[in-house]
Image: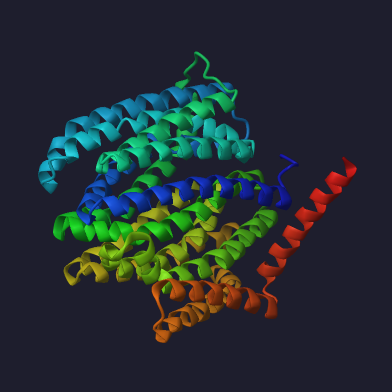
């Protein structure tokens, strides 16, 4: 077992992962604001549909083998090289498929521009295929600083060029080129930073062993991706491109915030969990720490965003995007639970039970799709409310196996997150009450942010929330350690 993996190292690597995700998401966020001011809701409806098919194809490119490389304790050079070549082959196959089906999809949604945009953007699948093994190597060795450099460098270069394309009037193509350049530059930087190189070897038996674990993650990822993208597919067909554009804008900000934290937690904790897969009491401690910490951070973040969604939309995106506000508020409820889903599911994967992971995905998605089709005739808002309800149900389903695997029941988890949830709800009500003052948009937002943050931190301190104390002690310990290192130098 890697002795360097302990709570402090996990927090340190989580910080680097947060910096990586935060830097990427921050620049993307700025780019999206600029594009939202230049494009119409209909334009965003088109890009929202295209990214659905790219995401689905990318699931096959990732194929779960990257996670299998991380989870396997005695990974060999033959494993890495075989996965590398297989991912390249799968990417080429998926690109050919997208090239062929593009006209049929375009006819179904009656969007002529869909064909050239989808065909060009499909090239990013090949760039992504080059990154799978490099990412696995860095994550397995907990080298998240290098991931930070690669991601930040790529998004900075592609972001600047994307803004330039948008300024020159490229419209939808600005986002397409930005994403392609980002994937290409990421591949180049990782190739430079990661010393691993593929050998001239391909062992089918090695891939088969990895695929035994990875295939279930592939199926789970495919189910999850199809489900997460079924909403834009239905909205784009049943309703209108404008509604789809408002929907995409509404969930983007909560998605950026939560995916930043959630992706960091997922990238850091899976290799950490995998190291302790044979030490269940220690693994339970890590899972609990992840759930308590993430809920303490994410709950107030989403509660505050829901309360401040209207002034944020007016200031960042202008009044033309106000119809997206209800979508943003409902999305905040859905995304608030994501880190809890992640911690439970990563623990299940870490102990090698990807079969349980797959079963859970099938059960959850069956329930969610049933609710979706019941709510479609009732309207878009009914669809999102139904998704909020199923999100709570999914949290219970994800936690259920860990009662047996880790002796960490759903009721224990609810008890752990309840203090943060109650304070976040009260904070949300406080922020909403600011609207009663009928102040200007900027003043309202500033007061909401100050009042919300002050209340949450003060309440956490007064009630001595365990997670708040833990985070303070961790920060103090880190500062003290850095000071001691400086004195020693």
**Nearest the eye: 466 or 215:** 466
Task: Report the residue that reaches farthest toward the bottom.
Answer: 436
Residue visible at 40% across and 66% down? 312
Looking at the image, which residue sits at the far right? 488
On the question of residue 71 being in view, the answer is no
How many badges with numbers are in the image? 0
**Can you give x and y, in whole percent of width and height, for residue 232 in the image?**
25, 55
Q: Is residue 161 left or right of residue 283?
A: left
Percent x, y for residue 170? 26, 39
The structure residue drawn at horizontal position 61% and vertical position 40%, both measured from the top left corner, is 144
Q: Residue 84: x and y, percent?
A: 46, 25
Question: Which coloring applies here?
Answer: rainbow
Q: Is residue 188 above or below residue 166?
A: above
Instruction: Answer left or right for 66 relative to 55.
Output: right
Q: Residue at (38%, 34%) from the top-left corner?
A: 61
Residue nearest the viewer, comparing 1 with 161: 161
Point out the image quarter for the N terminus: top right
Q: Is residue 413 above or below residue 228?
A: below
**Quadrant position of residue 183:** top left
> Does residue 373 appear left or right of residue 88 in this picture?
left
| Percent coordinates x, y for residue 341 in the rendering | 48, 59
Left or right: residue 116 versus residue 262 is: left
Q: Nearer the viewer, residue 451 or 140?
A: 451
**Does residue 434 appear in this view?**
yes
At horizontal 75% and vertical 41% (from top left) the residue drawn is: 3
Farthest residue toward the top? 200
């Amino acid at each position: 077992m890697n002795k360097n993996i302990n709570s402090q190292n996990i927090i340190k690597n989580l910080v680097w992962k947060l910096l990586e995700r935060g830097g990427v998401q921050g620049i993307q966020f700025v780019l999206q604001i600029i594009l939202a001011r230049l494009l119409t809701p209909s334009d965003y409806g088109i890009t929202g549909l295209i990214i659905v098919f790219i995401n689905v194809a990318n699931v096959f490119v990732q194929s779960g083998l990257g996670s299998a490389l991380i989870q396997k304790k005695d990974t060999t050079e033959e494993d890495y090289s075989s996965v590398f070549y297989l991912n390249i082959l799968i990417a080429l196959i998926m690109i050919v498929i997208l090239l062929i089906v593009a006209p049929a999809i375009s006819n179904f949604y009656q969007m002529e521009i869909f064909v050239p945009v989808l065909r060009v953007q499909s090239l990013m699948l090949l760039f992504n295929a080059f990154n799978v093994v490099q990412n696995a190597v860095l994550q397995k060795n907990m080298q998240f600083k290098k991931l930070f450099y690669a991601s930040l460098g790529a998004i900075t270069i592609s972001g600047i060029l994307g803004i330039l394309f948008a300024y020159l009037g490229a419209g939808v193509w600005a986002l397409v080129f930005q994403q392609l350049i980002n994937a290409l530059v990421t591949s180049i930087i990782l190739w430079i930073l990661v010393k691993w190189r593929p050998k001239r070897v391909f062992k089918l038996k090695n891939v088969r062993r990895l695929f035994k674990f990875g295939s279930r993650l592939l199926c789970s990822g495919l189910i999850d991706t199809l489900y997460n993208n079924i909403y834009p597919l239905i909205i784009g067909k049943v309703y209108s491109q404008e509604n789809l554009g408002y929907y995409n804008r509404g969930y983007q900000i909560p998605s950026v915030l939560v995916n930043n934290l959630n992706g960091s937690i997922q990238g850091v904790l899976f290799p950490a969990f995998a190291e302790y897969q044979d030490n269940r009491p220690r693994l339970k401690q890590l899972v609990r720490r992840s759930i308590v910490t993430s809920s303490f951070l994410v709950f107030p973040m989403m509660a505050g965003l829901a309360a401040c969604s209207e002034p944020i939309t007016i200031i960042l995106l202008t009044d033309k995007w106000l119809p997206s506000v209800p979508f943003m508020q409902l999305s905040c409820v859905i995304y608030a639970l994501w880190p809890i889903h992640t911690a439970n599911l990563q623990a299940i994967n870490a102990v090698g039970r990807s079969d349980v992971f797959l079963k859970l995905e099938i059960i959850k998605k069956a329930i969610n799709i049933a609710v979706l089709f019941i709510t479609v005739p009732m309207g878009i808002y009914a669809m999102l409310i139904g998704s909020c309800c199923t999100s709570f149900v999914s949290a219970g389903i994800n936690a259920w196996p860990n009662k047996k695997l880790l002796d960490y029941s759903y009721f224990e988890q609810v008890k752990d997150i309840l203090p943060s949830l109650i304070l976040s709800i009260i904070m949300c009500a406080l922020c909403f009450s600011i609207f009663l003052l009928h102040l200007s948009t900027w003043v309202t937002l500033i007061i909401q942010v100050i009042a919300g943050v002050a209340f949450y931190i003060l309440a956490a301190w007064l009630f001595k929330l365990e997670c708040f104390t833990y985070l303070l002690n961790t920060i103090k310990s880190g500062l003290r350690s850095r000071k001691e290192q400086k004195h020693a130098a």
